[in-house]
Image (cartoon, helix red, strand yellow):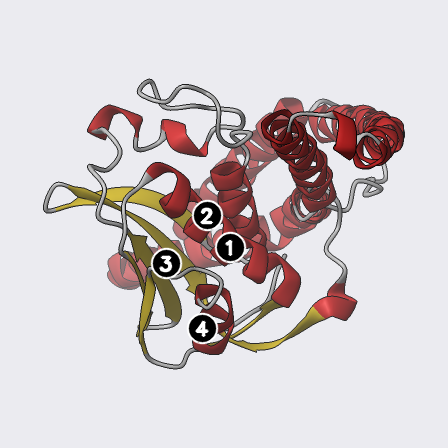
Amino acid sequence: MLRLYLRFYLALLASLLLFVLGMLTLYHFKGTYWPASLGLIHTRMSAHIVITTLALLIGIGAFPIVRQISKRLERLQRGVEALGAGNFTARISVEGRDEVAQLARAFNDAAGRIEELLGAHKALLANASHELRTPLTRIRLAVELMKDRVDPRHKEGLEQDIAELDRLVDEILLASRLDAVTDTRRIEDIDLLALAAEECTRYDEAHLEGSSVTIRGDSRLLRRLLRNLLENARRHGSPPTEVRIAREAASAVITVRDGGPGVPESELESVFRPFYRPRDTDGSSGAGLGLALVRQIARRHGGEARCTLENGRSAFVIVLPTDHGPR
């Protein structure tokens, strides 16, 4: 099969050839059959007719070629969109031997490698979580059995370490699940104000304000998003923590701020990186995954999470569309 650029080149040459032939035909019949007195009028009219006819013929002749190429590109686009939406089994039929076929073949190879890597990644995390939870359970049981022979302060420290490890395993597993295709069975209408009110009751210094906004989403994930933001404010900020729910155009906006000094301007984007810790912390609190999960959950619902500065205080702003559910 001819390469793509050669097919376009030959189509262009054929169009030029038709144009030349049409002009030669016009020139031949102009002097043979038309009276001299009507030559100028007929020449202009015939030129317009021939040019219009040639344009129609070129358009009709080029349409099948262009349409064949565009249909294959549209299939390729649909495959890329399906892969981007999380369907890692998406593949494209390879037709021909030109550049579009090579691109489709390269896409299929890349999609296959991504699917294999994701499968290995999920299997590794599943096995690791099982292997981690088993010793954690044994350690917790051992601490309970030896509670009368251990200094209460040491026992409390061990329990905190176990709880921290348990939370870390849970957050790693959740981050892994967010990479998979969304379970549409859990999508429902959610009142963000009511959900935020439930989470704020868990914190003494959390104050909620705003209006009722309903979105389509996964209540478990959105609850985790709010809880991570409140927990981040409790650990790294200062009371009180202010939570606001508002509607802006076709979006729901969640804003969480506290009374602490805030995040330095140079770290406003870095705080969303997994396992990132601010420079001024001692590393004794949190696993560094909470805000990374906040952004993952927001993006899963078609929104975005960002950290901004307002009057010297940092605020976490989550924007979620109200017109569709998670992707």
* Residue at numbered disc 1: 227
| Of callouts 2 and 3, the N-terminal one | 3
- Asked whether residue 72 appears in the rendered view, the answer is no
* Residue at numbered disc 2: 231
Question: Cβ–Cβ below 8 Å for labels 1 and 2?
Answer: yes
Disc 4 from disc 2: Cα separation: 15 Å
* Residue at numbered disc 4: 197
Q: Mark 2 belongs to which amino acid?
A: Glu
10 Å crowding of disc 1: few (<14), some (14-19), many (20+): many
Q: Residue at x 65, y 23 (%)?
A: 6
Q: Mark 1 belongs to which amino acid?
A: Arg
10 Å crowding of disc 2: few (<14), some (14-19), many (20+): some
Disc 1 from disc 3: Cα separation: 73 Å
Tell us which disc is closer to us: 4 or 3.
Answer: 4
10 Å crowding of disc 3: few (<14), some (14-19), many (20+): few
| Of callouts 4 and 3, the N-terminal one | 3
Q: Secondary structure at mark 2?
A: helix
| Residue 308 locus on image (x, y percent) | 25, 43
Disc 1 from disc 2: Cα separation: 6 Å
Q: Residue at x 73, y 47 (%)?
A: 75
Q: Quadrant of the N terminus?
A: top right
| Of callouts 1 and 3, the N-terminal one | 3
Circle number at residue 48: 3
- 54 is higher (above) or lower (below) than 173: below
Q: Mark 4 belongs to which amino acid?
A: Ala
